[in-house]
Structures are given as C-alpha cells and as structure tokens.
Amino acid sequence: MTEGSITKKLVFFALPLFMGQLLQQLYNVVDSVVVGNVLGKEALAAVSTTGSLIFLMVGFIMGLFMGGSVIIGKKYGAKDMEGVSAAAHTLLAFAAIMGIVLTVWGYFFTPVLLRWMGTPDDVMPNSILYFKIFFMGSLGNVGYSACCSVFQAVGDSKRPLYYLIASTVTNTILDVLFVKFLGFGIGGAAAATIIAQFLSMTLAFTKLLRVDGPHRIYLKKIRINKDILAKELKIGLPTGIQNSVIAIGNVVVQSNINAFGSVAMAGCGSYFKLEGFAFLPITCMCMALTTFTSQNLGAGNYDRVKKGARIGSAISVGCAEVIGVLVFSLAPILLRMFSSEADVLSVGATQARTESLFYCLLALNHCLAGILRGAGKTTVPMAVMLSSWCLLRITYITIIVRIIPKVNVIFWAYPLTWSVSAIIFLIYYFKADWIHYFARQEKQPA
C-alpha cells in the first residue's frame, strides 16, 4: 500500500474484499431466501427483524476491532514487526473474551429487546428461537472477524475471501438440507449459520498459526498486552460506540416498521437484504482506504494519503450511483428472490425506489469516515454519524410517523440523514487541517 500506483493498490486490495463481502451477503441472504420460500412470510419477518439487533450486538465489537486493525497497519507500514506481532496477539485474545461475552449477552437479553421493539406475537416465537441459536455461534463470528482484521491490516485481503467461500457454500448446503429436506424450520437456518461461522473462523485461525510473516500467531503468546489494548480501544471505542448507537437508532426504525405488521416487516427485510449487495462497493473501498491510510501514515507518506482519499472516494461514489440506478430500475425483479407475495414486493420496491438514487451520498460518508479512522481520528465520524444517523433519524421518524402514519415516510429518513452527514463531512474535509493532524500523530508513540 505504501508504493506504486494508488488506483491499482486500492482496486486490487478492494476486489477480494468485494468478493468476500458479496459472499458474506449471500451468506446472510440464504437464510431469508430459504425461509421466505419454504416457511412463508411470517417466518421471513422473524428472520428480517433480527438484522438490526444483530448489528447492535456485533457492531460494537467490530468497531473495537477497527482499532486493532489500524494499530497493526500503522506498525506494519513503519516496519515495526515486533509491534505487529504484539498487536495481533492482543487483538485475538480480546476477540476470544468478547465472543464469550456476546454469546451470553445475546442469548439471555435478546427476547427482552425483541419485546421492546414491539415484535408482533405471531413473529415473536420464531424470532427468539433464531436469535438464541444464532448467538450460540458468536465466538465463531467474532473470531473470524478478528482474524480478518489481522490479514487485512498487513495488506492481505485474499485469504479471508477463500475462507468465506468455504463458509458460504457450507451455509447454503446446510440451509437447504436443514430447512427444506429435514424440516428443522427456522432453527435449522440459524444452526446452519453458526456451523458455517465456526468453519470460517477455524480456517482463518489455522492459517494465522502457520503464516510466514510478523502477524503469525503463536498460541502461547495469545494474551492481553494492556498498553497495546489501551491504544486499540482508544481508536476502536468511538467506532464501537458509533456502531451501537446507530444500531439503536435502527432498532427504533425497525420498531416503527414492526407497528405496520408482518407484511411491512417482510417487505422491508427483503429490501435490506438487497441493499446489502448494493453497499458492497461502498464498504469495500472504505476498508481499503482505512488500511491504505494507516499503512501510509506509518511510512510517513502524507501526500500519498491525501491523494488516495480523493481517488478512493471518487471510485466508490461512482460505483455506488451506478448500482443505485440499477436497483431503482430492477427492484421488483430482484426482490422476488425473497418472496413472491404481491403485498410484500410492493413494500420492498417502494423502499428501494425511495433510497437507491442516494447511494452516492452514503458512499461519500463511508469513505471519508474510513480515511479518518485509518488515521486514528475516530471521534469525528462518531460525532457526525451519531448526530445525523441516530438523533436526527429518530427525531424525524418519531414526529413524522405520528403526523403521517404510513410506512413509506420511514424510508425517507435514510436519504435525509445521509445528506446531512455528507454536508458535515465535506465541510470538515475542506476546512480542517486534517493532513497536518496526521503528521502530528506520527510523532507520538503508537
């Protein structure tokens, strides 16, 4: 990442991430496709309502891992190989602890959260069952994500893709087997997911035990280094808080959707699955920019960081808008993957056509946030996104739904808040002395 063509480095790093994220979305979508077509719209609604709660629980920990990835990338760019090793071992030790915590917390508290969300009675039993089984696999999910953070921090985005391919194929086969042929119902879909998650974690961790490089893991060295963990948390904690609070905002959004019944839940849930594919160029370039920024800061290439920010953002924004136009045009056809019921398709298509043409704004937000996170300046994206994507979004929905009690007014909350945060980010980008902040940070021990 520190030498050669910036465009090629970003694109070739992002492509495996894109394939991996594509498989991750397929991985997540398989449950909805199989459940929706085999078990019906009530079961589909039960799976759909879990998305925002899963992100609430997992998003905080994934944000914390961002700090570890930035520290590893920064030390790797500075050729501090002992620092890379210490940071990687600390990250994996921390992941093991968090995986256990998430398992316990998710298993016991999600029924309460589902009730707070106003989940309808006809959906509640399936939602609780799916959640309890799903979170029994938290250690696999968290462990795989931590291993991927280590690989990506040193510029290796290919190996996580290979392991995800194996996991996705396994999940797909087991989903069809458990739900369609063995009749295990929605619990079978959740069981297929956790088996696949543990497979991907096992493959990634096994490779880290054998890899030739400073990020190689040794079992006896997996422990918490308090000083390194403190630095990882200093960077990662704002992102974790941001993810959690935004997820709480999404839970509020989901609660309002739930109030319109299982048809609205199924329709919106189907769109959110489709939306996950549309966001792939955004999330992949964002991750590429974070790694690019952290490595080049470690190497002292400040001008390269600034140039990479412009190139990466332009690529992501352009791709996102092209995909937005396609989603707008093909929404009814694409949504048939999840359900063939006309009322469900109508809700999903309405949401798609409300939001899709604004994907360019979402891309800009994520790219600028990714650059700042790569520099360790995580409080700015946290403040911007919390104020816009949480407080403003909740305020808008709380007021407008009471005035106009229609589900489609909820959909406009997303373009509105994306627009506000994009304006704030652009003002900061052009007005703040952020490149010199990077230079000052490099003079401090990392």
Image: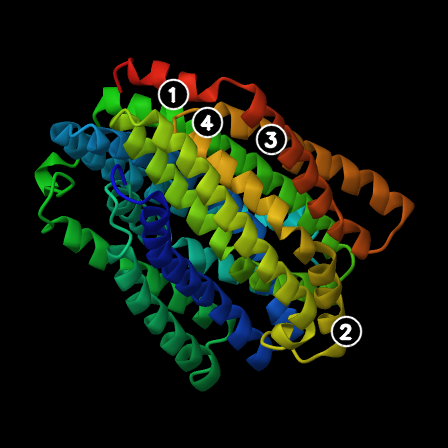
Q: Nearer the viewer, residue 305 or 99?
A: 305
Q: Quadrant of residue 342?
A: bottom right
Residue at which label 4 appears: 378
Seen at 41% across and 17% down, the residue is 436
CA–CA distance in space, label 1 to label 3 = 18 Å
Disc 4 or 1, which lies upstream in sequence? 4
Question: Quadrant location of the C terminus?
Answer: top left
* Amino acid type shown at disc 2: Asp
Q: In the rendered view, does 331 fall on the left or right side of 154?
A: right
Q: Give me the disc on residue 438.
A: 1
Question: How many residues crowd mark 2 within 10 Å: few (<14), some (14–19), many (20+)?
Answer: few
Seen at 17% across and 30% down, the residue is 86
Q: Quadrant of residue 402?
A: top right
Percent x, y of residue 81: 13, 31
Question: How many residues crowd mark 3 within 10 Å: few (<14), some (14–19), many (20+)?
Answer: some
Tag 2 secondary structure: helix
CA–CA distance in space, label 4 to label 1 = 12 Å
